[in-house]
Image (tube, grey):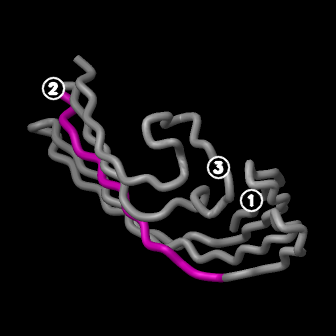
Amino acid sequence: MYTLGETGTLASGKNYTQTITGTDAYSTTQAQNSLLGTFSIDSTGTDAYSRGETGTASDGSPIDSSDSDSSAFSSTQTGNTFAGTVNLTLTGGSRYGLLEQFNNTADSANGGAAWETSRQWDCR
């Protein structure tokens, strides 16, 4: 179970406070070949959440809304420990994308909120 919160003001003048609570259900499978050095780790799951928002809209009217939903996500890691390579692919929604102004400082390329990416590293 998790809880996220955010309070802020948008450039439009909207003032808001958000609270998000949710749970993740996931499964992970792993495979490896010790002779070849290859491995794979696959995780799939669903994030179920409830979101509430209060505040004042840019026109001064009050905001009091809530919603609930779920989103699927997955990650796949593959690589070869002998060659020193690893690949990571992430798909689906992110709980942080539910926040009004989330900025993912770990990935400045996409600005943060939604994530769908594939990366490869050569660790030799």
Residue shown at 58% from the left, 35% from the top: 105
Q: Where residue 13 is drawn, which disc sits there? A: none
Give the residue at the far top of this rendering. 124
Membership of 39 in magenta stretch: no
Q: Quadrant of residue 110?
A: top left
Q: Main secondary structure of the magenta part?
A: strand
The residue at which mark 3 appears reads as 102
Look at the numbered disc 2 and give the secondary structure of its residue.
Answer: loop
Mark 1 and mark 3 lie on one chain; the one further toward the N terminus is 1
* Neighbour tally class for label 3: few under 14, some 14-19, many 20 plus, Cα within 10 Å: some
* Neighbour tally class for label 1: few under 14, some 14-19, many 20 plus, Cα within 10 Å: some
Look at the numbered disc 1 and give the secondary structure of its residue.
Answer: strand
Whether residue 4 sits left or right of residue 62 in the image: it is left
The residue at which mark 1 appears reads as 4
Q: Quadrant of residue 20?
A: bottom right
Q: Which residues are magenta?
A: 68-82
Q: Position of residue 26 (x, y in %)?
A: 47, 69
Q: Disc 1 or disc 3, which is closer to the eye?
A: 3
Nearest the eye: 66 or 43? 66
Mark pair 1, 3: CA separation? 11 Å
Residue shown at 47% from the left, 64% from the top: 93
Q: Label 2 amino acid?
A: Ala
Q: Disc 2 or disc 3, which is closer to the eye?
A: 3
Residue shown at 75% from the left, 80% from the top: 66
Q: Label 1 amino acid?
A: Leu
Q: Quadrant of residue 75?
A: bottom left
Q: Label 3 amino acid?
A: Phe
Q: Position of residue 35 (x, y in %)?
A: 10, 38
